[in-house]
Image (cartoon, rainbow, N blue to C red):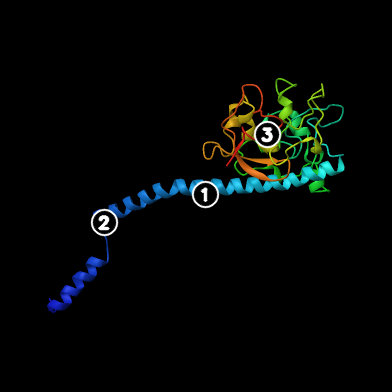
Amino acid sequence: MRWVPPRVRKATRRFNRAGGFTLVELLVVIGIIAVLIGVLLPALNKAREQSKAVQCASNLRQLGQGLQLYRQYNRDFYPLRRIWIGFTAPDSVYFWTGKGANPASNYGSQYVTASTEKRYINRYLKPNVLSGDEWPLAHCPSDDGAYDGYGNSYTLNVFTGNNPLSSRLYTVMDPTDPLMVRSVKGVMIRKSAEFIVAGENGGFGMAYNDSNISNFKRFHWAKFDRWNMLFADGHVTAVDITRGVSASQPPSHGANWRFEWIVR
């Protein structure tokens, strides 16, 4: 056996010791990584959802420009609930924009036949829009069902309500129309910076006490309790609608939702 000087043997032991981990050290490192993941993951999820909310707000702003153009060419009226398809005129809060829905969604054939080129404001944002076109502006990134089933993630504020003489005072529906079809003119809205004209489906589901529980859980629900809303003056902001919910009609205060839709 070859003789090795003590100084060299000591250095060799130090090198071998530094070249690997013991089982205990490895378990400690894994535990630290697991703790860091547990701490950081909720923050990452929140940041991801916040990014989706920002994209959603951007969509609504651009759709708001389409609404302004529609009003400019239609004597200041907001879009109707009803859309003529052949000899029928189905109505929906979604027909103001969006695309023809997925036929396999089973939400209703009217959402399929109300194809992209038929929906009211689309032609003002894209003059050559075609029947089978997708409409990304109408798709909120957090939406897991409305865009596919209705063709639109965003509700126009044309809810008719259970009491036509009161609930329609807080929407863009004309409360004097017995057929509950006609919309109002923009000039008729007294406080445009406080009056909501459209927004995320989940927020309207909450405000109108929608019986479809899935509508409550769409979008940013349980993460922010806030939904993006488009106001009559064109600005978009996240709104808290967890207060002021009536059993049969929207939150009410005068002709606007200033005190029930708490802006944060």
Q: Residue at x 57, y 49 (%)?
A: 51
**Disc 1 to disc 3, C-alpha distance:** 27 Å
**Coordinates of residue 195 in the picture (x, y in percent):** 70, 37
- Mark earlier in primary sequence (2, 3): 2
- Mark earlier in primary sequence (1, 3): 1
- Is 45 in front, or is 57? 57
Q: Which mark is nearer the camera, 2 or 1?
A: 1
Q: Residues within 10 Å of mark 3 (few under 14, many from 20)?
A: many
**Coordinates of residue 119 in the picture (x, y in percent):** 79, 38
Instruction: Please give the residue where the numbered disc 3 appears in the rendered image.
Output: 149
Residue 25 marker: 2
SS type, badge 3: helix
**Disc 2 to disc 1, C-alpha distance:** 33 Å
Q: Amino acid at mark 2?
A: Glu
Q: Amino acid at mark 3?
A: Gly
Quadrant placement of the N terminus: bottom left
Instruction: Please give the residue where the numbered disc 1 appears in the rendered image.
Output: 47
SS type, badge 2: helix
